[in-house]
């Protein structure tokens, strides 16, 4: 499925200007149909999979209890 620049911006929650910059920097692959750039939606699949993986890792890391530090002295 191909998206227009506007649809891609909505899909990625970015501005159209930013999407156009990424296209000109060759960070987003497109097909030019003579009038507009069309973006293949599936190229972002790996990106979103990595985001989910990092979110899970961060949640696991944040849920780990802090170990007690034996160097802390009670000064009361």
Image (cartoon, grey):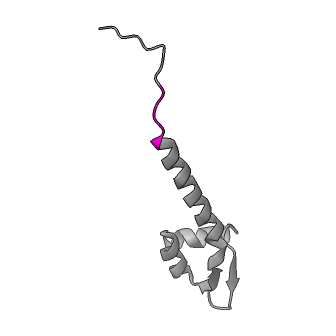
In the picture provided, is 65 more to the left or to the right than 4? left
Report the front residue among 72 and 51: 72
- Judge from the rendering whether residue 73 lies leftward or rightward of residue 14; answer left or right: left
* Magenta stretch encompasses residue 41: no
Q: Is residue 60 above or below residue 1?
A: above
Residue 50 quadrant: bottom right
How many numbered discs sit on the rendered protein? 0
Q: Nearer the viewer, residue 19 or 74?
A: 74
In terms of image quadrants, where is residue 76?
top left
Q: Please identify the dominant SS of the magenta region.
A: loop
Examine the structure image and report whether residue 65 is included in the region drawn in magenta.
yes
Query: Could you say where residue 12 lies in the image, as x and y percent from the top left?
Result: 52, 70
x%, y% of residue 6? 51, 80
> In this view, which residue lies farthest toward the left?
76
Question: Residue 19 at what x, y percent from top left?
Answer: 57, 71
Write the residue at 68% across / 91% down: 34
Q: Quadrant of the N terminus?
A: bottom right
Instruction: Point out the stretch of residues depicted in magenta.
Output: 63-67
Decide: is 3 above or below 24: below
Q: For the point 63% across and 91% down, which residue is it?
A: 35
- Which residue is found at the position 55% from the left and 49% from the top? 57
């Amino acid at each position: 499925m191909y998206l227009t620049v506007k649809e891609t911006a909505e899909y990625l929650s970015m501005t159209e200007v930013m999407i156009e910059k990424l296209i000109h920097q060759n960070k987003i692959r497109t097909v030019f149909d003579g009038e507009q750039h069309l973006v293949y939606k599936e190229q972002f699949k790996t990106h979103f999979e990595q985001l989910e993986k990092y979110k899970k890792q961060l949640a696991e890391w944040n849920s780990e209890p802090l170990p007690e530090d034996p160097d802390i002295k009670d000064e009361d």
